[in-house]
Every structure is written in C-alpha cells, then in structure tokens.
Amino acid sequence: MAKPDCGSVTLPDYQQERIGSQIAEGETIKSARPHALTDAIFNYCPGCTHGIVNRLVAECIDELGIEGKTVGIAPVGCSVMMYDFMNCDMIEAAHGRAPAVATGVKRVHPDNVVFAYQGDGDLASIGTAETVHAATRGEKITVIFINNAIYGMTGGQMAPTSLPNQVTQTSPYGRDVSKVGYPVRIAEMVSTLDGVAYVERVTCDSRKHIMQAKKAIKKAFQNQIDGIGYSLVEVVSTCPTNWGMTPLDAFQWLRDNMLPYYPLGVYKDVVADGFANAAEAALDRAKDCPIAQQKKEA
Amino acid sequence: MKGNEVLAEAAMRAGCRFFFGYPITPQTELAAYMAKKLPLIGGTFLQAESEIAAINMVYGAAAAGARVMTSSSSPGVSLKGEGVSYMAGADCPGVIVNVERGGPGLGGIQPSQSDYFQATRALGHGDFYMPVLAPSTVQEMADLIYDAFDLADEYRTPTMILADGMIGQMMEPVLLPPERDLDSLPNKPWATSGHAGKREHNVINSLYLSPEKLEQTNFERFERYAEIQEKHQRQELMECDDADIVVVAFGAASRIARTAVRDARAKGIKAGLLRPITLWPFPTKAIEQVIASGASKFLSVELNMGQMVQDVRLAVNGRASVDFFGRTGGVLPTPEEVLAAIEAVAAGESVCQSAEPGAVGSLLPHPQHRKSSYERGE
C-alpha cells in the first residue's frame, strides 16, 4: 500500500508498520505516536495530565535519539503505570525510592540516560530523603515530578503538596495548616541544593504551557547527556477524579489555585548562570570556604 | 585479617564492584575497607543517606546487571527489608551482609544470632525466601561470600551472609579466593541497561495487578526455591556417625558447641555436632541422616531465645527429643555451660523450662542454666 501523505512530516518506518494500514490514502498525518511509547493504551483518568507528560517524555527521548540507552524508573502511585507505556528499559520501584534506584543504575552505567518519574506523595513525602540526597549528590539523572496535590492511586488522600484548606479524603474539613502544616514547595527547595543543575516548574493546562513543559523536559534530558548535573522538572498537574471535578473545571482550579501557590518558571539553571556544570556552580557558591576549594588529585 | 575485612576483600575478588551502605556497628570495618579499596579497582563505594536508600541503590545496580552488595547490622537490616522484598519480587540478585548484634530495638552491639527468624523467614513482606549462608570462621567469611554471588546470580535472588559481631571482629589466618575474571561473570540478558535497539525493552518489576499472574509468578519462584533446597543444603557434621545426642549450632555458637561436644566425648557421652552452613535452605537431609544413624536427642545451641530450634523440630518431626540452650543479648555462653546442657540432656533432663513444643516459656532456660558458674560465683 502507498505510504500515507504525512504533510511535511515523513512517517518513520515503525509508524508505517504500526498504523500505516489504518490510514486512508490522501489522509494527512499531523502527529505520529512517538516510538518511545508502546502500543499500550493509556489507562489514566479523563483530564489527567499523566498521559500528556508520558508522551512529552517519549517525544523528547525520540528527538534526542536516546531510547536505546534510556532506563526509566516508575515508582509507586499512578506513576507506576509508566513502565507499561514506555519502549525503553524500565524499572518499577518502591514508594519514594526511585532516586536511589536511579543512582544504582547510573553508577553502574554512567553512559545510560536515567530518569525517575514520580508523583507528589512519592517524591515529596515518603521519598523526600532520597530526593534531597540524590539531588545534593549531584547524581546525573533527570527527575520528572508530577505535582497534582493529592494521592491519586489510593483514592484522594492529602498530599504533601495539597493546598491550604484543600478538601481531601484525609483532610475532610480542608487542610488545616495550624495542625498539619504547609505544602512542600519542591522546585524552590531543590533549587537551593548544590549538585543541582536545573530546576523548572511547568504545567500542561494549555498548548503553550505544554510546549514549554516539553522544552523543559528535553533540557533536563540534554543536561544529563552533557553531564551538567541533576535536573528536575516539576509539572503542576490535575487529578479531576480525586479533586471531584470535570476535566475543564480541574484545569480552571489549577489556574486559580495551584499556579499562584506554585509559580511557574526556572528556579535554577547553572548554564544560564554562566557555569559549565553544577559542580562549577557549587564551587563558586562556596568560594569563601578554603577546604571546599581544594583541588582533588586525579 | 578481620572477619569483616575478609568479607569485603572476598566480595571484590568475586567480582563485586558496587557497594552501597550506611554506617553501623559492628560491620564498620567492611564498609571502611570497601571505601578504601573499591575506587582503586574501578569500583564504586557510595555511602547512602539511609539503609533504605542503600538497599534501593543495590536494587538499581542489580537491575542494571552489576554484582552488588550492601552490609549492615541488625537494626539496619530491618530497614533493608522493603528493598529485599522488591529484589525478591523482581528477581534481582544481590548480596546482603548482616553482622548481627543483640536486639530487639537498638539492642546492643555485642554478638548475637537473634536475626535468624528475620533472615530465614523472609526479610520483608510477601511470599519469598532467600539463601542464607552462616560462616563460623574467618576463612568461611571468604568462602561463603564468594559463593553467595554465584548463588545469587544463578537463581536471580537476593542472598544473605548471616554473620555476627564475634566473627566480624575476629582475626584469623585466611586463604583468599582467586580474583574472578570479570568477563567470566554470567550474562544477564534481562538487565535494564538500555536496549540499544537490539532487543525488546526489558522491564524489572514486582507489580502484578492480576492475582492469577502474581500467583503464577510466585509458583515459578518457588520452583526455583525447591531446586535450591534440593541442591544447596550445606552443613558440617562432627562425630555424628554414632552420636546419640546431636548438638545443632551455627556461626559463633558452633565454635563454642564444638569444644563442648569434644569435652562431652571425653566424658564418654556420645555427642556429635551438626553445624548448618546454609540456614535457608535448612539442612534437613543431614537431620534425616543423623536420625537414620541413631540420634535420639537433639540440642539446639544458639545466641538467642530459641529460633533455629523451630527448624530442628520441623525437620525432626517428633522422631527424637529436641531441646534448646541459648544465651542472648550479646552474652556468649562458655563451653562449660554448653557441656552442662549436653550432660543434662544426656541424663534425660530438659534444659528448658518445658521441652513441650508450643508451651508458654518453653524455651526459657531452666534457672540453673541461665548463668555460668562464673556468673553464679561458684
């Protein structure tokens, strides 16, 4: 059968095999499924942004041509589903432990591209120690952090990132900050750590924001390939099911409440700051500390 | 060399190039030795932020195909339980060393064998076992950890060295095993190290949302366990051929029991020593053998409140009497105390309050066996 008309895009061979037969002659392909995604159908809830971010990660892997050397870590939570959807090697990890598992892989194969894909309960509560220490060790890994302010998989409990007064299953009268304290702002916190090359907070509520998110994710992978240091991209996300909203209302609630609390933007970028890598930036920050300035013999 | 250092050196010779750990007494020398030597041979020593992170780094490195280990002591090993369960569930090989100290809780830092249950009854949630090797000499520290890496790789399972503070801190001459050629290590086509476009992508996983699939996976794993039980039971038998009383003891306790058994023989008591080297699989075939050759009494001697004695009872299954003598909390019994226990059993007395299996307090030593003659001031 004739190759479908893909407009300006040439349909790669694998897409021809996958979907060629489903496309009528003369039909135009605007967007092809990334190779780094398997044929499995996403089972995320309607209006959840996991699917978008999974796809963005896959597109970045395709565009960087790194699928064959990428190892992803999907720990407990809705994130764990990701190992079904990716065509690169994947490891399922215990709750919160993805950065430690990623460290193990990266230390064995420094040339692999290793990423952890974690939710807020995972990264900012049970795995805070692993998160902070992988970052401060300057592990050359990429962390994608899905912050939807709730525990999705277990049915909507209060997360470390749930907003003040947010009603959840375990904060039925709203998150009372006088009793349970305040949300953890990961992008802000991680950006203070030496060893960290790049931290950006993005969201996926609009086409423009999705393109920004993709750019950030790609940069976080590129930093790893270039050996610049640890990178983290926080994606402010929705959970319509457990927020009890329609997908559209959820996006509006995200804009009205999440974004003012979790402002989008770049929180750290050592390259933009004029350093070659995170190590150089850390050395500069400690320029008044003599022992930190000692040169290591090779 | 010190026992703990020998564990480290022999592990490197077995091809281990990755060590992840967290400081704790009394395994200290092992990690210190690794920190010094591993970087010199192109390996990685990394002090993790916690025991939990350390075992998960081991899981990641194992998933990536490396020979990898961690070491700790009792309270730290409890923290590793989660990661060991994931390794078992995802069929990832690795070696975990426990240089035991007294417990429960923070316990103490003196030698103990009170983690026998933890080690042999699955160190974490879920249906699983792992091979557990128990050295009783510094030489065995070298030999057993060398074997542990092969066993782990062959059966794709976490494998434990269960030592104790006494053997860990002790110095003895040792003949070190040869350096493994890294190219001779087994291929791991299942590892997640990047598919390089040459194979289907690999997934290392312990999650099965379908109960039937999870059950099937567990069945398959237990087929492997059955093979390990069939092929890899190890023990040492001393003076067991004509023994009437068989003392069962492993690790540090077996060193004391060995002297006591010799002393008992000198007094004309037909005693023998069965020393399990593998605690899981428990050497049930050796128990069969000594029963077949006429043993009618068993005495389990342990540095705890009676843990392995349950495996002895299961294996003996009512065909002989099973008694227990132990000191715990880091207290080591003298050979004289163990001899007194052997003599009591030989005379048909029990050294426990009650030898009845399952009776409350059954394993608590009789008051006259709770202290040595020295402690009693005799």
Image (cartoon, grey):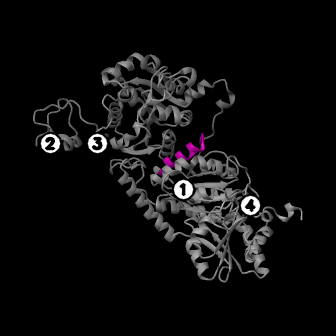
- Helix or strand or loop: what does disc 2 sit on? helix
Please indicate whether residue B338 sits to the left or right of residue B70 in the image. Answer: right
Q: In this view, does A145 lie above or below B207?
A: above
From the viewer's side, name the closer residue of A284 and B145: B145
Q: Report the residue marked by disc 2.
A: A21
Q: Report the residue marked by disc 1.
A: B122
Please indicate whether residue B50 sits to the left or right of residue A159 in the image. Answer: right
Instruction: Identify residue type, mark 1.
Output: Ala
Q: Which residue is drawn at 74% across and 73% down?
A: B349
Q: Quadrant of residue A10?
A: top left
On whether residue B334 falls in the magenta region, the answer is no
Q: Report the residue marked by disc 4.
A: B327
Q: In which quarter of the image is residue A62?
A: top left
Please indicate whether residue A164 sits to the left or right of residue B352 in the image. Answer: left
- Helix or strand or loop: what does disc 4 sit on? loop
Q: Give the range drawn in magenta.
A: B48-62
The chain to which mark 2 is attached is A
From the viewer's side, name the closer residue of B65 and B359: B359
- Helix or strand or loop: what does disc 1 sit on? loop
**Mark 3 and 2 residues: CB-CB less than 8 Å, in contact?**
no
The chain to which mark 1 is attached is B
From the viewer's side, name the closer residue of B332 and B185: B332
Q: Distance between the residues labelled 2 and 4?
A: 75 Å
Give the main secondary structure of the magenta stretch.
helix
- Residue A40 circle label: 3
* Viewer-nearest of discs 3 and 1: 1
Q: Residue at x 72, y 81 (%)?
A: B270
Q: Can residue B305 be seen in this view?
A: yes
Q: In which quarter of the image is residue B4?
A: bottom right
